Image (cartoon, helix red, strand yellow):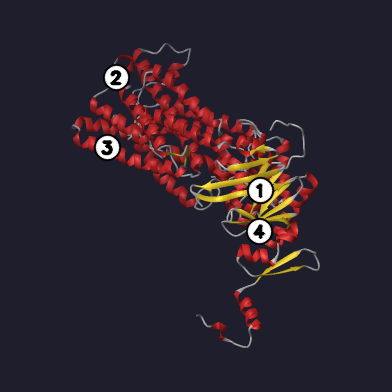
Amino acid sequence: MTRRRSGPLTRARLASRLIGLASLLAAALLVGLANGAGEVSLARWLPWTPPLDPIERAILIDVRLPRVLLAALVGGALTVAGVAFQALLRNPLADPYVLGVSGGASLGGVVAVVLGVGGSGALAGLGVPAFAFGGALGALLLIERIATIGGRLTVYTVLLTGAIFNATTAAGIYLIQSLASLEELHAIVFYLMGHIPSLPLAALALLAPVLILGVLALWSLARSFNALALGEEGATQVGVDVRRVKRQTILLGSLITALAVSLAGLIGFVGLIVPHLLRLALGPDHRLLIPAGFLCGAAFLVLADLIARVLVLPAELPVGVVTALIGGPFFLMLLRSHRGAHGFA
Amino acid sequence: MASPERRSTLAIEARALGFRYGSRSALDGIDLEVAAGEIVGLAGPNGSGKSTLLRVLSGVLGRYSGSARIDGHEVSSRSPRDLARSIAVVAQDGGFAFPFTALEIALLGRHPHLAGLAFESERDLALARDALERSGVAALAERPIDQLSAGERQRVLFAKALCQEPQVLLLDEAASFLDLRHQVELYDSVRELATEKGVAVLTALHDLNLAAEYCDRLYLLDHGRVDTAGPTDAVLTWANILRVFKTEVYVDVHDLTGKTIVVPLSGRVRARISGARDAPDRGSSSPE
């Protein structure tokens, strides 16, 4: 990990870094499309080759394309939510799930599995995500209500409320699991461990703008996140409306986390490792960190999902298991080699 | 305020200012004013309200009672951004979560002057480098803030405040971690700001000798009230200090500086003095 720094961030450096990371993401998307169960060459997509036959079409366009795109969106969103919460809580160990949204989402999703709400027609496969999203929003509203004291959200109460909420929903999920049938149990476990589905492209077209707008809105707060390095009072004293920034960050970060979790389950470590690596490589300026986090997180999850798809063919691993298996040891190594150097003083 | 005519507005003006933390009163009926170009000190024991007063004036504490005006405008009516364009604060740092460099921290002083996702201009960068230079930390510009010593961090925060180009500078124990040389350098540059740029300075400090040297006027706070206020030399008397700090001091005028000097008397010295006073009977060393 080379230690950066050629002075403060400039627009030119921002642009060059983002172009580099965008190419990385493009490469990851291509690798993700080119590999997987079923033999199709990507070259078959080139305009001068004969049209795709129905099987190739199904593999590439109906299965792999939506899956890599969703992996990219989910990875990007989780990373950006991680960066935003870390900035707000001034703690590099915060992840997108600290606020309890994940608890609400997983409880909602598990309830949907048990109730057998699958959704049909155009909504096929969207029943579980819809329930999960409802659960996440419910959690968010509840936590916000509980943690708001005298019109103010204090970081401590938000964190504590989130932690307790997550623990409580976990108990709820165990309760449901203990009563569920074997088949339901399998579906629940698979959902909870994180899995990227192949959504209909139309659903993606609906989802993508929302996630991307959320990310852009968080990006617009980047300079305020930088100022929060001075603490909440210090940030106020250089002109940050901390109360507004806090509220917006919690709402936006939770919204994109909720969408990601409801579609893909609990995928851990993305929102923790990618921001950390990027901070080491690019510095802590959030004007760069947020868009870079989106691109890098997206590429990371596309590749992790590829591993999940192909490692034990013809079966599949939950992608959450892959990210945790790569992420955990990697993170510990990182902690050891950079102990006390930055961020973990 | 129906009269918009421009009488000379005070940079800082507090009238009957009160503030409560929950049910505990922290400030009670404070009247204070600081004009442009003045350096005014706040002294008083721990918990006397110095920091609270500075925090109310900088807009970080909500609902105060009475009036607190900066450049004639009530603090509570101004947005943080608007306030930060006229006031800069140097307080104790609360630790930095991320490894921003000293230069990046100084540049945060430009935050209220920039909009949206804007990048700092060449001028902003020049201001920040100059501020680091004046604060004696130019050599640390590219070092991560979390690797600096407490005194170095304090000087970087001072540079950040300079970078803000404020009309009002609030210092809360801004020199507490500084060595002797850097204390003097910091207050020398504060004085330069006051005399050359007309910046109004309100500084909370424990070191009464620094106050005597640099402050034009001094407010002695006690239990959230102004105990005594006036020209620094007039405020720093043996009686005032004994009453407010509950501490015996020796007060004199220094031959060289012509300013008041305050020497706190330790238990050992006090014992010797009282020993000399009632020398004949030597029963005073009994613990009862």
Pointer 1 residue: B31
Please state the horizontal and vertical placement of residue B232, each as a whole percent of the image: 73, 58
How far separated are the C-alphas under marks 4 and 2? 67 Å
Residue type (three-letter) at the residue carrying disc 3: Gly
- Residue A119: numbered disc: 2
In front: label 2 or label 3? 3
Q: Chain of mark 3?
A: A
Q: Label 2: how many residues lie within 10 Å, few (<14), some (14-19) or many (20+)? A: some
Residue corresponding to mark 3: A172
Mark 2–mark 3 distance (CA, rounded to whole Å): 23 Å
Instruction: Give the SS element for disc 4.
Output: loop
The circle on residue B208 is none
Do the CB atoms of the residues marked 1 and 2 lie less than 8 Å apart?
A: no
Does residue B164 appear to the left or right of A119 in the view shown? right
* Chain letter of the residue carrying label 1: B
- Disc nearest the viewer among 1 and 3: 1
* Residue occupying the point 76% across, 32% down: B5
Q: Are marks 2 and 3 on the same chain?
A: yes
Q: Amino acid at mark 1?
A: Asp
In the image, residue A24 lies at what x, y percent?
51, 31
| Residue at the bottom extreme of this rendering | B280
